Image (cartoon, rainbow, N blue to C red):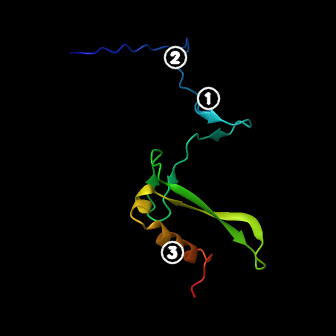
Amino acid sequence: SYSFCTLLVITSPNHNMAPNKQQIGMHNDEGDFVELYIPRKCSATNQLIHATDHAAVQLNVGDVDDSGNYTNTYKTYCFSGFIREKGGSDQALNRLTLRDRILREC
């Protein structure tokens, strides 16, 4: 059995003109080009986290000053479902926070 597909091409009267880059894509109120989807990377493996990876998590670890008050800044760590399935996210979070000097070795 065969299936047929019909393609309808609509062109403007000025079809020889290439589309303006300003017209293509998503724009915010100021006219700046913005992306709808920005992929995340796993902090432990540096691999892209797919949009369908529903086991992936993103953790924001807040920065504190010397007296222990939150400074309204944070560091973001993302872990893919693969790392979480293997049980490696706890060790990876400890390694990354040691690297970023959030935790200290005892």
Residue at image position (59%, 74%) is 100
Tag shown at residue 23: 1
Residue at image position (70%, 36%) is 31
Residue tagged 3: 95
Q: Residues within 10 Å of mark 3 (few under 14, many from 20)?
A: some
Left or right, residue 51 beside residue 63: left
Q: CA distance from mark 1 to mark 3?
A: 45 Å
Q: Quadrant of the C terminus?
A: bottom right
Q: Is residue 57 above or below residue 99?
A: above
Residue tagged 2: 15
Closer to us: mark 1 or mark 3? 3
Residue at image position (50%, 63%) is 43
Could you tell me the amino acid type at mark 2? His
**Labels 2 and 3: the sequence-earlier one:** 2
Q: Secondary structure at mark 2?
A: loop
Could you tell me the amino acid type at mark 3? Arg
Could you tell me the amino acid type at mark 1? Gln
Closer to us: mark 2 or mark 1? 1
**In the orientation shown, which residue stands out farthest toward the bottom?**
106
**In the orientation shown, which residue stands out farthest toward the left?**
1
Left or right, residue 80 beside residue 20: left
